[in-house]
Image (cartoon, coloured by chain):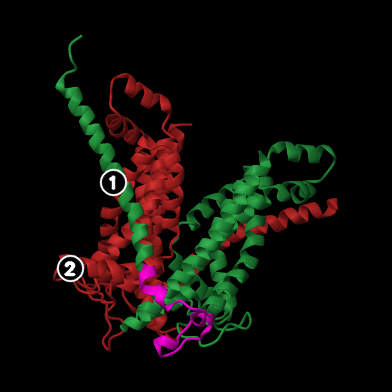
Amino acid sequence: MKASPPYAAVRHLLDRAFQVLALVVLCLALAALAVLIIDVWRDGASRLSWTFLTSYPSRRAADAGIWHALTGSIFVILVTALLAVPIGAAAAIYLEEYGGRSLAARVVEINIANLAAVPSIIYGLLGLGLFVRALQMGRSVLAGASTLALLVLPVIILATREALRAVPPSIREGSYALGATKWQTVWYQVLPVALPGILTGTILALSRAIGETAPLITIGALTFVAFAPDGLWSPFTVLPIQIFNWVSRPQPEFQVNAGAAIVVLLVLLLAMNATAIWLRDRYQKKLS
Amino acid sequence: MRRFEPLIERALLACALLSIGTTAGIIIVLAVETIAFLREVPVVDFLFGTEWTPLFATPRFGVLPLVVGTILVSAIALVVALPTGLLSAIYLSEYADPRLRRIVKPVLEILAGVPTVVYGYFALLFVTPLLQRIIPGLAGFNALGPGIVMGIMILPLVSSLAEDAMQAVPRGLREGSYALGATRMQTSIRVVVPAAFSGITAACILAASRAIGETMIVAIAAGQQPRLTWNPLVPIETMTAYIVQVSLGDTPQGTLEYRTIFAVGMLLFLGTFLLNLASAWLRARFREEYT
């Protein structure tokens, strides 16, 4: 056999070059994340302090804090969870355990896939027309949370269905064999097993919602609220809106505040994601 | 207990039907205000007018500047996200060590989970100043900076969906290609990518839909000047940024100005809806090919 023709050498060289190119591109994407975090940290870290967390907004950048926005964000997300989780779980249970291949189930399924891809600002317009105006909720925590609940519902339904699907059929069959009804089987056997999976998906969905800005601006959440929300009907603002407000101002001092608030928001997100991953790992160990 | 069973099933069904209600709600809310808007502004003026000045004393309602602004920023985002996303996907699917994949995929998920307002901050205060050093004529608000950052934002979406599509290609096709002496690059580009083509196209279309609907990056960094131009160096306004601009002011219900955001929203909804539909159709076709 003769030495391989130069063509083969060229091909392998090309293969190497392509691999290196692809790897470089991938590293660039990861570097972008690093640059983003470093940039925000460098801008905002100096402004972070306990007073920054516990102060109210102010016309003077040095006195302004995020207490109203932080409590607003947490309050709105808790109400969102109370609204969206039971409804989302119930819808998922219907689709996975009851609906089967019925026409209604299939239509709902296609519809949910579509809803998941609708831009979030459209949900804001829905919230404005439906909750704020038609149902007269005004620009309240309840209107904001209802809007976000509709926004995360498709994600929660998809995550819950996946968790339900992971429950082995033998558990259901065992329950039926003992004479349990369908609902008894779902409530006492299937749901407890699926719960960690449902929680993981739910937390991930809510961490998406806590960073949402556009739908809440559209329903008219105020950019300048000088107090923490004190009830479902209270006006409110949230961290991302406060960040938007500060970043839109020309003075650099306010932009430093925005950087600091972003650090707080990212830490909040990281904590939620870490909880979700921790739950997932515990759950996986238990099943195996 | 058994008496309640049908009742429970009904209640669960009602929750599932709420999602249909949401879609219906979106369409009704948008349609009611859009129809009221079109009663005052002829549909031809709205769709083909070249001036968008609804807040002026003599308002004009030609939506083209907003549409062109949206397409311009989205196109820049796709120019950034599609090649890089697809190359990343090829690397992760065809070349990478499983250990590397286990590290890289969660990092890409984090990149996808960063709130868009943070990307807006990044575009305005980091990327645009950086670009201004290279391009002297670049305005502080422009389409280029936010477009690039939006590309970074949708890259993980392209990469993960395209990788899923490539992973679904049967091993036998790759092995056949290797058996004929092809290199990994030849196998990736001539066998795996064509086999996963409809899945990859679906990923790209979904990315386009995401770019068109993205709001905060452009609201922060692209400026708020509706102008009919393909020049990426000057301030523009997108459809989403316009909705934010009006929402920030205290617009009374029932005015023509209030209705404009629903009319623009309707256009946005229809555009993204068609793209999502095309993407879903392609994905369903792709699934049929390999199952």
Callout 2 and callout 1 share a chain: no
Indicate the secondary structure of the residue bearing disc 1: helix
Mark number for residue B133? Answer: 2
- Side of A208 where A166 appears, left or right: right
- Badge 2 density bin: few <14, some 14–19, many ≥20, Cα 10 Å: few
Q: Is residue A248 magenta?
A: no
Specify the quadrant of the image occupied by residue A12.
top left
Please name the predominant secondary structure of the magenta segment in the image.
helix
- Badge 1 density bin: few <14, some 14–19, many ≥20, Cα 10 Å: some
Residue B19 vertical placement versus A145 (above, below)? above
Please report the residue visible at 63 percent of the width from the left and 82 percent of the height from the top: A231
Mark number for residue A24? Answer: 1
In percent of width and height, residue A196 lies at 65, 52
Indicate the chain coloured green by its letter. A
Indicate the chain coloured red by its letter. B
Please report the residue visible at 54 percent of the width from the left and 70 percent of the height from the top: A147
In percent of width and height, residue B139 lies at 20, 73
Depth check: A268 or B42 in front? A268
Q: Chain of mark 1?
A: A
Magenta-drawn segment: A40-67
